[in-house]
């Protein structure tokens, strides 16, 4: 695709339910990031995938959060037993190279999650 | 680890005037400094970046300057226009660390 694709674009869920958010990176991009952005706030790093290396999960806020990526393609972020404080935009981003700095990262439009 | 501080958190300027946003970083090994613009309800998008072997870079009305000694870099927007209203994020990363460390963002308001 032309850009990073995320789905769903909007999700309203009841407290306690599980949600899955999907990210399809730009073709050929080996690096993939998930960020959380609460309303009016900055970018909170969650997790990073780099090719076939073990992901950097240091930003995941609790064990309710997990993410998977199959090879260098689609990634899924799962939030279990959602809480109201999980309400935010979840942004996925991808980058064309691995292991080096100085690579532009491209963001998707985000998945807007509202927990009621 | 790296820490990036961004100031001011909100900046209001008259249309046509210049705007300057400044970021400081802590890791002297950082060598890549991008700036992203995020319009309301939209995704962040790269507007300009600079690497540590360069002191200044310009692209039309925007420019970024880097002072490695003082460990700060700044975004300059000249002849501001209403469409410049957005939140601007700076970031820094090192050659040994793929991670971009982000500033907290600056909300730029252009007054007509």
Image (spheres, coloured by chain):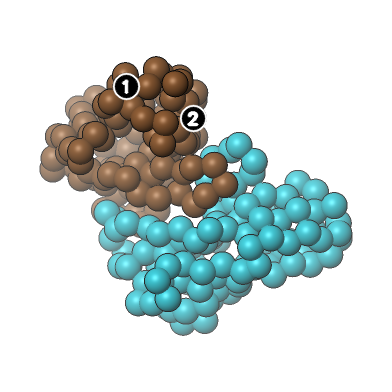
Chain colours: A cyan, B brown
Q: Position of residue A52 (x, y in %)?
A: 42, 78
Residue that lies at the very extreme toward the bottom in this rendered image: A71
Q: What residue is rendered at 60% in x and 37% in y?
A: A40
Q: What residue is rendered at 35% in x and 77% in y?
A: A28
Name the quarter where the N terminus of chain A is drawn: bottom left
Mark 1 highlights which residue? B16
Q: Is residue A66 placed above or below B91 in the rendered structure?
A: below
Q: Is residue A114 placed above or below B34 in the rendered structure?
A: below
* Tag 1 near tag 2, CB within 8 Å: no
Circle 2: is it few (<14), some (14-19), or many (20+) Cα within 10 Å? Answer: many
Judged left or right of residue B17, residue A38 is: right
Q: Position of residue A116 (x, y in %)?
A: 85, 52
Label 1: which secondary element? loop
Q: Is residue A13 visible?
A: yes
Q: Is residue A51 visible?
A: no
Judged left or right of residue B75, residue B54 is: left
Q: Position of residue A66 (x, y in %)?
A: 65, 66
Tell me the subunit letter for badge 2. Answer: B
Judged left or right of residue A57, residue B60 is: left
Tell me the subunit letter for badge 1. Answer: B
Q: Quick one: A45 or A1, which is closer to the camera?
A: A1
Q: CA distance from mark 1 to mark 2?
A: 17 Å
Quarter holding residue A16: bottom right
Q: Position of residue A67 (x, y in %)?
A: 61, 69
Quarter holding residue B88: top left
Mark 2 highlights which residue? B107
Quarter holding residue B97: bottom left
Circle number at residue B108: none
Q: What residue is rendered at 79% in x and 67% in y?
A: A18
Circle 1: is it few (<14), some (14-19), or many (20+) Cα within 10 Å? Answer: some
């Amino acid at each position: 695709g032309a850009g990073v694709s995320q789905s769903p674009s909007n999700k309203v869920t009841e407290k306690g339910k599980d949600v899955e958010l999907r990210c399809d990176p730009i073709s050929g991009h080996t690096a993939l990031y998930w960020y959380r952005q609460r309303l009016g706030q900055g970018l909170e790093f969650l997790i990073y995938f780099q090719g076939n290396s073990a992901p950097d999960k240091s930003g995941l806020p609790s064990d309710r959060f997990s993410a998977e990526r199959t090879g260098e393609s689609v990634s899924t972020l799962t939030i279990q037993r959602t809480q109201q404080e999980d309400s935010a935009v979840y942004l996925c981003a991808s980058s064309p190279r691995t292991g080096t700095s100085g690579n532009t990262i491209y963001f998707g439009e985000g998945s807007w999650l509202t927990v009621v | 680890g790296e820490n990036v501080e961004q100031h001011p958190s909100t900046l209001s300027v008259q249309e046509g005037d210049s705007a300057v946003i400044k970021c400081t970083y802590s890791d002297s090994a950082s060598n890549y400094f991008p700036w992203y613009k995020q319009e309301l309800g939209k995704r962040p998008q790269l507007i300009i970046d600079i690497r540590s072997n360069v002191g200044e870079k310009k692209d039309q009305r925007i420019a970024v300057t880097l002072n490695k000694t003082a460990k700060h870099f700044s975004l300059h927007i000249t002849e501001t226009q209403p469409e410049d209203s957005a939140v601007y994020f700076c970031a820094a990363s090192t050659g040994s660390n793929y991670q971009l460390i982000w500033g907290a963002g600056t909300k730029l308001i252009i007054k007509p």
